[in-house]
Amino acid sequence: MNFLYILALATVGALIGWGTNRLAVKLLFRPLKSYRIPLVHVEVQGLIPKRKKEIAKIIGRTIENDFISIEEIIDEVLEKQRSGNVMDHIKAKLRSITAKKMPTFLPRSMKEKIHTYIEDLVEEEGENMILELIDNMSRNANQNLQLATLIEEKINRFPIYKLETIVQEVAKKELKHIEVLGGVLGFIIGLFQALLVLFLW
């Protein structure tokens, strides 16, 4: 009889622990929209939907401050372009433009000299011009384009139900562990209560 009593209380404790943890996991996202409970006049909404704007602001600020800035993104892109023979591209482009713009009556040798002069000029001054361009772009981008704000706006526009699906897919195993752990702790607490009641009686 005592064994059945202990088992019953432990089982009830396990169910309560599992159920409350399962509910807690659900309440991270549900309800998606604010819901007013009649009579008690209390508004209920999932933690993440309710705090979505604050979460978006924190994530945006953290990424910009601690991970990557606009200047780093621009420098990385331009560094890759520079290593990919940007100077050759500029020379080819200028050659194409000057070939179209130069008068047709000019002798071929004269045109070649002009092309060579322009290419030499690009070779001498091009690197400094590119560095100056990178510096200006980084400065202007930092002033006019806030990475944190962009990320914040993107997260705020992202549908909350999709975010819930992503979190559940990524952390499915961990969320299940939380539920099971609630059941295990509930079982232990129920067992302890049953033993305590038996010893006190």
Image: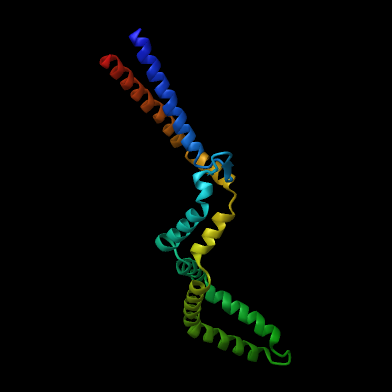
Is 181 or 32 nearer to us in this picture?
A: 32
Q: Where is residue 114 in the image (x, y as percent from the top left)?
A: 61, 89
Residue at the outermost front position: 39
Residue located at (33% from left, 9% from top): 2
Is 166 or 30 nearer to us in this picture?
A: 30
Residue 177 appears left or right of 122: left
Seen in the picture, residue 2 relative to 179 is either above or below; the reply is: above
Q: Position of residue 166 (x, y in %)?
A: 54, 43
Residue located at (44% from left, 33% from top): 21
Indicate the quadrant containing the N terminus: top left, top right, bottom left or bottom right. top left
Splitting the image into 4 quarters, where does residue 174 fall?
A: top left
Residue 3 appears left or right of 95: left
Residue located at (63% from left, 81% from top): 95
Residue at the outermost top position: 1
Q: Can residue 152 be seen in this view?
A: yes
Is 124 or 199 nearer to us in this picture?
A: 199
Q: Where is residue 23 in the image (x, y as percent from the top left)?
A: 49, 34
Indicate the quadrant containing the C terminus: top left, top right, bottom left or bottom right. top left
Seen in the picture, residue 121 relative to 79 is either above or below; the reply is: below
Residue located at (72% from left, 90% from top): 103
Is 111 or 125 nearer to us in this picture?
A: 125
